[in-house]
Amino acid sequence: MTEIKKTYKNYVGGSYVRSESGKTFTVELKNQNYELPLTSKKDLRDAVTSSKKGYESWNKLTEYNRTQILYRLSEMIEGNKESYIELLQEHGLTKAAATKDVDNAIDTVVWYAGLADKWEQVTGNLNPVAGDYFNISHQEPIGVVFTLNSSDVSIDKTIRSFLPAMTVGCSVISFSENNSVISLKLAEDVNNSDLPEGTLNFLAGDFSKIIDDVSRHVEVNALALYGKLNKENLKTINENASTSVKRVFNLPSEEGLSSVLPFIETKTVWHPKGR
Amino acid sequence: MNSWEYSESIESDSIVSIQSKYGHYYDGGFTSPKSKEYLKTVSPSSEEVLSSISIGNEKDVDAAVNSAKEGFKVWSKTKPIERAKYLYKLARLIQERSREFAVLESLDGGKPIKESRDFDLPQVAANFFYFAGWADKLDISWGTKEMKPYGVVGQIIPWNFPLLMLAWKVAPALATGNTVVLKPAETTPLSALLFAELCDEVGLPKGVFNLVTGDGSTGSHLVNHEGVSKIAFTGSTSVGKYIQNATADRDIGLTLELGGKAANIIYNDAAIDQAVEGVVNGIFFNQGHVCCAGSRLLLQEDIHDEFINKLEKRMQTLRVGNPLDKNTDIGAINSKEQLQKITSLVNEGVKDGGQLFQIECELPTKGFWYRPSLFTNVQPSYNIAREEIFGPVLTTLTFRTPEEAVEIANNTEYGLSAGIWTDKGSKILWTADRLDAGVVWANTFNKFDPSSPFGGYKESGFGREGGRHGLLSYLKVKS
């Protein structure tokens, strides 16, 4: 019987799409090579448009609902555990290392799922101002976040590059380079987890091809760079970002409460007390 | 027109002694500038030269940063509770010498003494008290012990609240274990120089607080100095963008508190008289030299005429004049340049078709002054409705529905603050949720407290000052 091979595509707005440019790049694994879409500037713009809508939809849901959707993602990954382990082995990991990585990834999703309806209780608070005022620091998501995935071959790391922002209500465009097969495979489980369209988009390609556009795009509210960049690229990003005071987070924390802090805006509301 | 006559009640300026010339402050003492250059600081209410201050060049900044580096070696090993005590002592000294500071602030900056005395100075002391208490509680502030200070922090502050901005910056930076090189504004350096004397008096270890005076070039040297690990800036959005750009290739902490064009939304069910007071306070406080000023008045259409009528009457009672007169509501415009900027934007607004109301009052012959002004009949596209004027000029727009109010309020690159006036609680919460603003005042405006985080969305900058959230601006946090 002829074995058939899966075609991996970008995942944007709840659909699997090729690059509009028709261009691809090759990821060479142990036994297979994959031709993946080489994301173009136009693909990026489409993803941003989708993420804007996704942001609205994600924020219409209650935090309780978001918690369940993220938990559903962990169930999906658990169900496909063997295939992830195989894929990681294809990337050169030992079976033990691959198994550990997938187990960690599941735990990571469960951890963030449970945080989705609690983080504001930890990061927000009443402020004891000197006077008869009710004063509260309410916490809001920063908006559309573009994340550059770490180059480590790891499902857990990939997940840690988009879940912190999503947990606090951001929509995310997750961009991967060498480990794109992993993230595009993950897109399938994301697709089966009831996430509203556009909440999480996956793109593959060569970051240097879109670096200028993504850092200039005014509808991208923040860039989180989990992948290491050279000084020159980092400079380009920050310079472009400065034209609209865009937030750029270089190598942000990947675990615990500090991992979500970059993606929060604090809104402090005052009201007088009286009769 | 003005129905009440007041007798003058002038606060004496004999309490302050201003030296004819000031050096920079680092290594625990005042030093003449290596640049050998000075600039004059004038009183904007009299145009009198008050003193000459040093212009910091690259070498001056370098010396101050080195001093801060040395200071950090000591300060980072100083027990947190000892750091706290220094800050408490500073708070106490500020309280004790608060009248002197207030007069100095009004002389150098032009703000009414009632504001420097009753607002700025009490807030300055409160900030030092508040952050002093955090110094030895950082481990419980965000539930993690793994928080580190940056090291040397470069701080650049504006001229609208000179000493208060110093307090907002210096108190949390020192509490979290950083050392500071502060660059006060070119036009208002005197209160910061007096503060440096206080640091001596409390015995703050040398190099912990450092001060370099000067102009924009001095600030630029500070921003570009490799020894600075974090920059905290308050000022215009254009300079904020310059700083973000200039530090693009460095691994550096950055917080920016930039401009604003806040909407003050008045729903038709608001308590109108209170709202009029709030709107007046929102825009005319400190001559409108406030980044979070409520400079766009958003009126629900059906109350427009009634509201404007009451507002104009109330505005006419504002007293413009000598900042040291205790009856003065509106002091001097901070500088000639700022006065020119305000004048030109207002002229443009008139040319665009806006209807301008200015109060009738006599203005002093010397100094820089501007009449409290109100624009009606304004289109959202006019520059007066978009650009930060940073003066006593209010621009009126109207709306019909809450949705429209939110849309107009958010239709700006800025996102620092906003106001909501209504008697309906659910409408406050609905509106507050939808406004892109870091601070929302509901049925009040321009309220501040050291425990209350302040800072913007969008192009109004990033990072917060004040409160528990303000600590994060000066700490690297790991979980």
Image: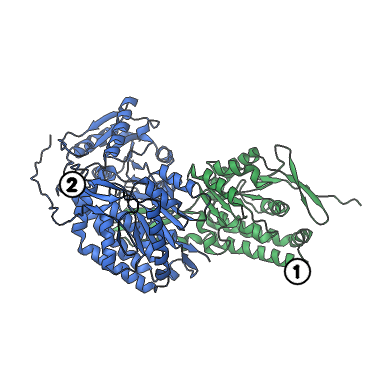
Q: Residue furthest right?
A: A1
Q: CA distance from mark 1 to mark 2?
A: 75 Å
Mark 1 near mark 2, Cβ–Cβ under 8 Å?
no
Q: Position of residue B111 (x, y in %)?
A: 22, 47
Residue B182 bears which disc, if any?
none
> Foreground mark, 1 or 2?
2
Chain name for mark 2: B
From the image, state the color of chain A: green
Q: Residue at x 59, y 40 (%)?
A: A49
Which quadrant holds residue B48? top left
Would residue A175 be found to the left or right of residue B115 on screen? right
Q: Position of residue B459 (x, y in %)?
A: 44, 44
Would residue B458 be found to the left or right of residue B291 on screen? right
Q: Position of residue B216 (x, y in %)?
A: 37, 46
Mark 1 secondary-structure assignment? helix
Q: Is residue A234 above or below residue B477?
A: above
Chain name for mark 1: A
Quadrant placement of the C terminus of chain A = bottom left
Q: Are marks 1 and 2 on the same chain?
A: no
Which quadrant holds residue A51? top right
Could you tell me if residue B42 is visible in this image? yes
Would residue A244 be found to the left or right of residue B313 on screen? right
Residue A96 bears which disc, if any?
1
Q: Is residue B264 above or below residue B360?
A: below
Please, what is the three-letter code of the amino acid marked with disc 1? Ala
> Closer to the camera, B66 or B245?
B66
Q: Which residue matches tag 2?
A: B323
Please, what is the three-letter code of the amino acid marked with disc 2? Pro
Q: Residue at x 19, y 51 (%)?
A: B114
> Closer to the camera, A208 or A103?
A208
Mark 2 secondary-structure assignment? loop
Which chain is blue in the picture?
B
